[in-house]
Amino acid sequence: MADSGVFPGYNQVLEFVKTSLAKVIRSSDKVPQHVAFIMDGNRRFAKKHNMELNEGHNAGFESMCRVLELCYESGMKVATVFAFSIENFKRSPLEVNWLMELAKDKIKQIAQHGELAEQYGIKVRVIGDRSLLPPDVLKEVELAEEVTKNNKRAVLNICFPYTGREEIVHSIKEIMEETAEGIIDYREISEKTIEDHLYTKGQPPVELLIRTSGVTRLSDFLLWQLSSKGCTVELVDCLWPEFTPFSMLKILLKFAFKKTFSPSNDEDDELKKKTT
């Protein structure tokens, strides 16, 4: 009898079903090219299951890896995950130091010791205010980017440490510097100018945001990117470590169905014009 209490080969069947559905989504050509995740609920998961806090974060990391594998199998090009907010520095020094060590270890695991970057050809980019990182953590960040810099198939943006407001301020500062240097004419500054100086410059627009734990706020994440037309927001009422590849599959299937059978906003606008 299988240790899990289910029939022999159960996990293999699940893996086959997951892979098959991922291929169906990929062939539909209705895959969101850029998906963002607010991975909320690791601490509550640990409390719920009487775990140490680090066990909850480790469970969240494993969930992230499984979900990202499914996303990349489905044909997604960019994933952006909210790993650490600048606001988290307001927590106790002990917890901040512990979270920094955890992040350092997990970034190294993704880039150098895990299959995720190698198998799916993922380029790791750590975005945010790096001046706030301790030197040893910054060293691992730079090494992860160096190790994966030639990967071309997909991108993983790790927001660490990050807030959407800081990103917009960073963009404005860069524009001001280039204006002072004569690179940019201030009279030609537009929304695109700001977009071209965001951390996500050159990447596909965010088409899908997923937030777990039932919380209904953006928490200062990708504020500029998520305001763009056509971005779908999915608020999921489960803790992040409970969010499985099959949870993700349901959302991707729903997204593909809407893209296939629902009229676009542009078509809706045309319809309104014809009926007025």
Image: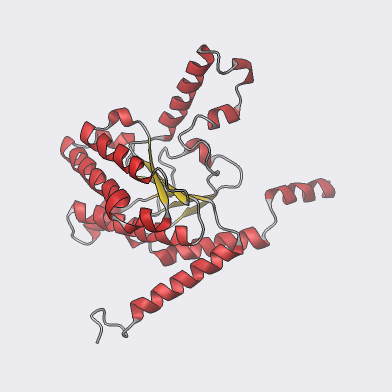
x and y percentages locating residue 2 in the rendered image: 25, 83
Residue 237 appears in the figure: no
x and y percentages locating residue 181 in the rendered image: 51, 13
Q: Which colouring convention does the figure follow?
A: secondary structure
x and y percentages locating residue 275 in the rendered image: 83, 50
Q: Is residue 134 left or right of residue 11?
A: left
Q: How many marks?
A: 0
* Screen quadrant of the N terminus: bottom left
At x 31%, y 35%, the residue is: 87
Most extreme residue toward the bottom is 1
At x 34%, y 82%, the residue is: 9
At x 18%, y 60%, the residue is: 50
Figure check: 201 above or below 169: below
Residue 43 appears in the figure: yes
Q: Is residue 136 left or right of residue 270?
A: left
Figure check: 177 above or below 90: above
Q: Nearer the viewer, residue 132 or 85?
A: 132
Q: Quadrant of residue 157?
A: top left
Q: Is residue 269 left or right of residue 157?
A: right
Most extreme residue toward the front is 150
At x 38%, y 64%, the residue is: 244
Q: Nearer the viewer, residue 150 or 50?
A: 150
